Image: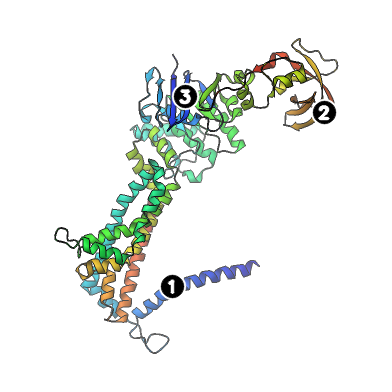
Amino acid sequence: MSFLRAQGLEKKYDDSLVFTHIDFALEKGEFVTLLGPSGCGKSTLLRCVAGLTQLDEGQLFIDSANVTDLPARERGIAMVFQSYALFPNMTVRENIAFGLKMQKVPLSERSRRVIEAIELVELGGKEQRYPSELSGGQCQRVALARSLIVRPRILLLDEPLSALDARIRKNLREQLRSIQKELGLTTLFVTHDQEEALTLSDRILLMNHGKIIQNGTAEAIYTEPANAFVVRFIGNYNLLSSTQAYQALGIKSEKQIAIRPESIYVREEGRQYADHVRHPVRGQVVDYLLLGNVIRYRVNVSGVELLVDLLNRSSERIFPAGAPLELLFNTREIREVDEDTQEAV
Amino acid sequence: MRRSNSIGHLSVIIVFMSIMMLPLLGTLLYSISTSWSSGMLPDGVTFKWYKILFVEHRFLQAMMNSIMVCLGALILTLILVVPTAFIVFYYFPFLKPFMNFIILLPFAVPPVVSSVGLLQIFSNDVITLTGTPWILLGAYFTVALPFSYRAIANNMANLNLQDMLDAAHLLGASTFRAFFTIVLPNLKTGLMISLFLSFSLLIGEFVFANILVGTRFETVQVYLFNMKARSGHFSSAVVVSYFLVIMLMTILAGQWGKKQ
């Protein structure tokens, strides 16, 4: 039996549907991400799970108990907000202890648990500071400690890293995942950043227009996109119409063809390729982008531009604009996808 | 360049301070002068006007009346405005434009007009409030309302009220508890501004006080008006004392704010 189960959830404001037909489940200790573009309904869905927004339809179960009509503070759910939502009039210590104070936990135990939580998020020495005296990353760690200290049954994270700069975001992302694993916390994470979702999640629920489009592991979402929307959202795919696919690769298909840039090879003299790496086509480099460890080439193949990612092993492998290339395709990675037929709700 | 800029900036401050301080310094000087009629400076210095003033029961009573009615009106205003602003900002944010409009209504009617209206309504056989501090309390409440609401609303707009309350709820606090432990302490700046502004305004109010209660509940402004024929030095001493009370209240409130 799943630890968190959502059945037929629906929410609307006046006549406009925010989300509908939402069904999903989380296993105990699982880290699941609600991923989708802005305005797809993922944050409202998270608020409904928390009990901060009322559902119009559907039922929610936590550990087999129906919590649909339970007030937020009785659900045993903690949440970390994008805005941190720290209490400005309280010190780091008071913020973290707030939940325990509400639970009337004795002072001695409260102090012990606050010290543990501060150590867990590595904020030692900052106990007496006020939120206005902390950086964004530190504020978010206080918010995380404040949520974890009450030992929630489920942790909800509403784009907690979005307001932080790239370096802090990366560090905090790793810290977040390691704490979640260490505590075995069932976690539902909301983000619009596909890289964040792919890096952190055990499983991803990909949403668009208020519906779950694909539910699967990060690997499955990345390598087996359910439709053209997933292909576009996950990014960097070569998405060819059936005409383009025939024109460039000679592939006949009624559907669109999705090919990941890293599954395209540049033929090298004398190198042996597996049987499924074939479909040789000739092309010409249009330009390239240096992405650090990867070089992304734009290659013109019979009038169709393809993105090809090659590992940046040495400067000798950089093909200049105009250079002719012979491309090979991993046929196992060529996907036929339907257009996203989901209508906006 | 930098130097000349500094001198320019300093001059602006000096001119501003002079405009603000000179009348007060003149009044102070006049209140401690024996007589001041023929020269640039007073003929002599004396504290006799203050000695007379501070033993005069009528003045002390008027000052007490002013302070009591102002504080009463302020307490009444805050009791009503703080929860109202909270409810509007948290539960009905769409009402904010309506509140912004309605809160300015007291400005639409001049005090002379509204005090005549109040006089007619509250001087009948059924409800007789004229001449009592209660009618002044009500009138002052409407005067303080726009200033208090604006100061508190501005403060509330700067708080991330929705997320803070949501976080508090999820951590086990009721809305009532969250209001007292989180919202109210974070409104300190707004409350302070509201109190300073309204208190200074109300203690200097004359029109409502004179028309609605007059000498039956004499406030310091009405007292000052009634004493105008007595002596210019004495009136100056009243004005300086009134200013000192405002300053004292401001310092006390500031100290309280720091402690909080």
The residue wearing badge 1 is B21
Residue located farthest toward the bottom when viewing the structure as drawn: B38
Residue occupying the point 64% across, 66% down: B2
Q: Quadrant of the N terminus of chain A?
A: top left
Frontmost of labels 3 and 2 is 3
Which is nearer the N-term, disc 3 or disc 2? 3
Residue occupying the point 34% across, 56% down: B145
The residue wearing badge 3 is A20
B238 over A117 or under it: above or below: below
Kind of element beneath mark 1:
helix
B135 relative position to A195: left or right: left
Query: What is the three-letter code of the residue carrying label 1?
Result: Met
The residue wearing badge 2 is A319
- Check disc 3: other Cα within 10 Å, few if <14, some if 14-19, many if 20+: many
Q: Quadrant of residue B111?
A: bottom left
Q: Quadrant of residue B257?
A: bottom left
Looking at the rendered structure, whether the residues under marks 1 and 3 are on a common chain is answered as no
| Pointer 3 chain | A
Frontmost of labels 2 and 1 is 2
- Check disc 1: other Cα within 10 Å, few if <14, some if 14-19, many if 20+: few
B123 relative position to B158: left or right: left
Kind of element beneath mark 2:
loop
Q: Judge whether residue A115 can be spotted in this image.
A: no
Residue located farthest toward the top when viewing the structure as drawn: A275
